[in-house]
Image (tube, grey):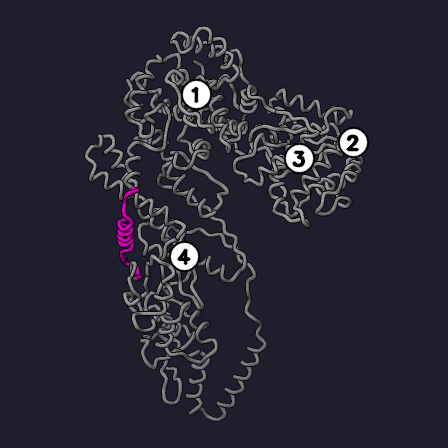
Amino acid sequence: MIAFTQVAIPHSDIIEGRLTMDVFAADLWQVKNNKGPVEYTDKDLFFKKTYETKGLRNLIEVAENRLKRGTGDPVIQLQTPFGGGKTHALIALYHKAKEWGVNVVVLDGTAFDAKEVRLWEEMERQLTGRAEKTKGNSAPGKDKLIELLSKGSPVLVLIDEILEYATKAAAIKVGDSNLASQTLAFLQELTGAVSSVGKALVVLTLPSSTPEHYDENAANLFLQLQKLVGRTERIYTPVLDDEIEYIVRKRLFERVDEEKAKQIVDDFVRYAVEEKLLKSEEASWYRERFLKSYPFKPDVIEVLYKRWGSFPTFQRTRGVLRLLALVVRDLIDKEIPFIRLGDFNLNDPEIKRELTKHLGPEWESVIFQDITSPNSGAAVVDEEIQVSYKSYKLGSVVSTTIFMYSFSGKGEKGVTAQEIKNSVVYPTVPSSIVDTVLSKLREKLFYLSEEGLFFTNQPNLNNMLISREQNIDDEKVVERERQIIQEFARKDDRTLEVYVWPANHRDVPDDERLKLVVLKEPESRMEFLENCGDKPRVNRNVLFFLCPDEDQRIAFEKFLRSLIATEQVREEVTSLTENQKKQLEEKIKSLKSRLYEELRKYYRRLFVPDVDDFQEIDLGIPAFGASSLVSEVFERLRSEGHIVQKIAPVLIKGRYLSNQDYVETKKLYEALLRTPGETRVVSKEVLAQGLAEGVKIGLFGLGRLGENGPMCDHFKKEVQVRLDEGEIVVSSELCSKISSSKEDAYKPAVQKETDQRISEDVAELKQEKKPERAYKSVHLKLNVPFGKVSEVVRTINYLQSRFSSINLQIDVKATGGSLDKDEYENRVKEALMQSNVKIEEEETEPW
């Protein structure tokens, strides 16, 4: 049989991989402002790719009569389910009205901020260039609108998503009323005004029922809008159920060779009758359906439009188009005669996302475990089927077909074996092979219901585990939590001592070592900071507190209960089948691989003592591959400058010698340990090295505090800093002065006089010296060596402390390895999304 791509030629944007999902997201406001996809803004291209339904033809004809001749309905309501083609119809009217020379007003409820935009003002602004007669928070009245429309006649007013605008407007007070009430009054006045003007038409959209994601207030507004416009409007439906196939073919395919399509369809219908998949009297009806939907099997359109389309979140026409465009793109190189439900590649991240976003994220694991993973039940059946049929991958095709039949927003689910046969087989395959495949799948699939051919996310074993989870003592959960923390909080080669759930503040010693205190109750951190046993704590600047995020507590405890229950079932239940034992081992392995990730999602609040209180750091989600609390916390503290492994001499001078001639090194170190918010060094050697370096380069000197005051013993030379009693670091100015005093003791008077004159000249030069140059902005393009990312983060944090605005763009190119597609979706893209990081460009190269 000939490949479908030689019969139905896809549009170039699909063939060339230029397809973007916004192509199917009709936006009237964008079109009005000549923005958005060219498929909508270019009139000729728009109508070339638009199938003109009966409803759309009728709508355009009625609008033309009204706007050119003043006859017909003055108010038209477009009413369809969510995603039923309303906005598309408005865009068609927009282009036609412009072609007729009509003034067009566009009021888009999704585009306007109700705090800033009043619909009556916006209408006048679009017609006259400014809002004067209608200006104000109250509806302007019918007479003003008649005057406005008459001067602008002929005029078409397109109102899209008015319910969304009214819902937003309900929150804005207008005297004793609110903006939603004023908007309703305006609509009533407007519908009356257009009836009086003649060559004026209002076309507005309302959903056929209140969308489920709206609240009770929005439902009341919806009823008021229906009642209000129902007095004067006619309701039109742009797309009828039996027209969706034509819309799909027109939008996705440049052309279809009807003769070749008829040959393929006839071959299948003949085979289906022979195999008793169709009765003889059904053949003609099925042939007509298949010709209408080709290259898609009829059940593809029916399942998507009627079953999946019944989900409140599934935009029927647009959703079907978007999903099928992805499927066509994925199958372009496949030599298949037509497209079946079983050909939907659930391993493709975009196709999978288009489906699972209506079901819930848990279904991604169901798909992976049962259909797409290399070890899934479907893949096993692909290999187990007899050799002559292996290439058809019937295990995966049948499983995918069952999956697509498993869902409906109205509760309808499941498929019969006969329907599966009709959906998946080719004329080159005996339909009886499907019975064998179904038998094997019932043995292999973990989530296939025992009550019929549909998937569920609750396997039998899982029911057993849930029952166990509900009976686990809280004490066991708490103890397991402690064990996991201790496992991942073991001290490594870092310099943080770790204390897990100390019972009392005396359990955390008051010494100079940097410490990470893991607390179960964040509220107790101040008590630990201020006290150590019966005495006040002295070294307060060496403590850091890691605490749980209460919002994540339920999820983490559920995870622990799942882990404990799984281990208990493995150890205590003796009646498990071999297949259930295998599932159990895989589940335990999966749970244990997530231990650190789940722990860190819970323990993510890091408190750093500061001058007045604590600075809180949200650690966010764990870095990929991380497995140590100590390492992650240390790196975060180091990257943000809370811990330093090297202290710059210029920092010492600027912070501690800017307003004084000297400071005792021992007291300086003690201040770092004791004063919250001061610089934290990983060890006293770090401070000693920083001081020694400063002495060597002449930023300051080192000496002793003698009976007659400070002495500078070492300046601009190598020195060993001891941080002991009496040792001082001396400002460079004082060092110079002390040195001069020593020389003055034996200089001749004339020499002293000369030196004094030189000193005065230098002072005068210093006074005339211009300020050092400063930079008001910095732009760096960095090529970062592997392993140095944290250094860059630290530098950026420093820049952020000096500039009010930091715009950071990162270009990541990873090569020299490989990454599974699901890992990429879940570990990389999902992590970025949860951190509110927007991916502006994305390019991946298949293996």
- Above or below: residue 460 compared with residue 485: above
Whole-percent x, y for residue 35 in the image? 63, 37
Nearest to the eye among marks 3 and 2: give it.
2
565 vs 70, left or right, is left
Which range of residues does the magenta coloring cover? 469-496
Provide the residue designation for mark 1.
340
Which sits earlier in the primary sequence, circle 3 or circle 4?
3
Which image quadrant is residue 189 in? top right
Provide the residue designation for mark 4.
791
Q: Which element carries disc 3, helix, strand or loop?
A: strand
The dot on residue 159 is 3
Which sits earlier in the primary sequence, circle 1 or circle 4?
1
**Is residue 291 one of those drawn in magenta?**
no
CB under 8 Å between callouts 3 and 4?
no
CB under 8 Å between callouts 1 and 4?
no
Which sits earlier in the primary sequence, circle 1 or circle 2?
2
What is the three-letter code of the residue carrying label 2?
Ser
CB under 8 Å between callouts 3 and 2?
no
Tell me the distance, in whole angstroms, between the alpha carbons under discs 1 and 3: 39 Å
The dot on residue 197 is none
CB under 8 Å between callouts 1 and 2?
no
Which sits earlier in the primary sequence, circle 1 or circle 3?
3
The dot on residue 196 is 2
